Image: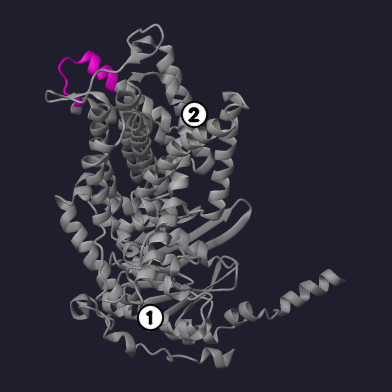
Amino acid sequence: MANVAAPSTSNSFSWQVPAWLAPLAVVVAAFGVVPFVASPYVIEAILLPFLALSLAAVGLNILTGYAGQLSLGSAAFMAVGAFAAYNFNLRVDGLPLIVTIILAGATAAAIGIVFGLPSLRLKGFYLAVSTLAAQFFVQWALTKFGWFSNNSPSGVIDAPPLAIAGVTFDGAVGRYLFALSVVTVLTAFAYRLVRSQAGRNFIAVRDNELAARVLGVPVLRTKLLAFAISSFIIGIAGVLWAFAYLRTVEPHGFNLDRSFQILFIIIIGGLATIRGAFFGAALIVVFPLILSRLGSAVFGTVFDSGVLDMSQRIVIGALIIIFLIAEPDGLAALWDRLIKRAHGRTEP
Amino acid sequence: MTRHLTDVGSIDSSSTQAAGPDVASLLQGYDPGKPATEPILHLSGISLAFGGVTALTGVDLRVEKGEIRAVIGPNGAGKSSLINVISGVYSPDKGTIGFAGQTYAAMRANRVAHLGLARTYQNLALFKGLSVIENIQTGFAPRVRSNFVEQTFAIGRARAEERSSRQAAEDAIALLELTAVRDRPVSTLAYGLQKRVELARALVSRPVLLLLDEPMAGMPAGEKQELAAYIRTARDSLGTTVILIEHDIGVVMGLSDRIAVLDYGHKIADGTPQEIQANQAVIDAYLGIAHPEDDAVAGEARA
């Protein structure tokens, strides 16, 4: 026992790729290449919802993946962010867009803390049920009180144009670059956070709450911090969803289905991994589109669109189940395995 | 039994003596030869019951500074309950807990670390999602003052805190010879190593009092001896007072300065290993020898 086996050290002369190189390459490509090659359709229908949902999943992953607090209220916090941004923009003259977004995130964080309070006593499924209350309450309040949507008769309101310091992010490419910048900054923040003392506290509370408490980890504060930061990020994801993707703000888009969608994204992508949120969102956004293209191409003349839509959902559900049985740790773990295998093949 | 009990002093701690990074500086203020006047921990009249089931009845315990104090007893004697009362996991129904000059009706789990108390668990309570060094760094939590913004951007107080928590963790890793596995996820380690990581996590905050709840349970004999040596090293180099629950009488006799024996929630004996070894009540509790009055009762019942 005293002589611990030395770890198998890899060959010192084998070339090592720095860990930050791959994410940097992705960011550079996303900023420098994608805007020139992607068609407006790809940006509008795939990349914008992908970015918004990825960011929401990064936010939920902090709460559920890292801090272990199960939440079914993600869409509610998206809605809070979107409506807060709309109202700040509407009611405060000349408020810069950046400030609006930060205030929207802060509002979502405040609501998140309120609905996170039950987590101090409840765990697991019981907590999930109490976050469900957030989902229903927020949606109800936004529909019930016309003030939130500026008394618009339909409850559906147009989002204002995106402009920072005189530069307007118009058109598909402009909105894509805007969303990409926000997602990049917040993802970098989340990445740093989960590797700090605060991130270690999240994991400690998740893995063994009693041991964390006895060690002196401030458990209550850690849980509420997770709720606040998670809701902050999800709220800003809601701003992107409404302002950059849909360009309308309406409560119905932020229903329980959306909350489940975000939860599925982090489960499929991999809990407690940042990149898993992006893998999962890619699958959830792109896969239905491919299926529906495929479905209408093959069966379009035989079945009507309702039947196709239904069977598409069934196929996705079945694939998720099969996938989770094959790889319970999600796409991120699958990715790591593939990388490792590729390395094993190139290195003797 | 006797052969087992005389197996004293077989623990060889010399192999671990050189392990401490700065043993000499850690030793200051610790003098094992000098008898302490004020006990570091003083339980008096601790009683605890769960519903109708009594776990502890009027237990008194004095623990002097710098000693290794064992608590032994058969299964269900209340040993773990006692540890849980001291570490604030349970609140006693009666009695007081004196710790470091203060008297408490009950300890609070979220404050004990700040008072200088650390513990390990009978069933491992490591953080599976963290590496060895990250697990150990978590033990530094009571000293952290910075907020999450400082921590995320490594600015302000967080900078120095991260540096000192890493240093403290490295010291604990060196002390317990965990260097080879420092970056491994704890869940991939063998059981004995995980026990050692837990000990390191408890030691990283330099606790005044260390509670070990069956640290050697389920280990082969050789590993038990090694862990015993690590516990002694921790006491000798950090001056930590140790309360130890253990089933293996042989290890306990060799390791501890004084032993308290619990049976059915009562303390039935308290003294040096030699005294405990000769104590009739202890032998009876372990071997289940019937007293004459028991025979009488049994006889009456039969009649």
- Between label 1 and label 2, give the one nearer the viewer: 2
Along the line of sight, the residue nearer the viewer: B267 or B51: B51
Q: Quadrant of residue B66?
A: bottom left
Prevailing secondary structure of the magenta residues: helix
In the drawing, does residue A206 fall left or right of residue A30?
A: right
Colour mapping: one colour
Along the line of sight, the residue nearer the viewer: A330 or A191: A330
Q: Looking at the image, can residue B206 be seen? A: yes
The magenta-colored residue range is A85-97
User: Pointer 2: residues within 10 angstroms few (<14), some, or many (20+)?
Assistant: some
User: Pointer 1: residues within 10 angstroms few (<14), some, or many (20+)?
Assistant: few
The numbered mark 2 sits on a residue in which chain? A
The residue that mark 1 highlights is A4
Q: Amino acid at mark 2?
A: Leu
Whole-Å distance between the Cαs marked 1 and 2?
50 Å
Relative image position of residue B282 (x, y in whole percent): 58, 79
Q: Quadrant of the C terminus of chain A?
A: bottom left
Relative image position of residue B32 (x, y in whole percent): 28, 81
The residue that mark 2 highlights is A256
**Residue lying farthest to the right in this orientation:** B303
In the drawing, does residue B286 fall left or right of residue B299?
A: left
Q: Residue at x 39, y 6 (%)?
A: A153
Q: Residue at x 43, y 14 (%)?
A: A143
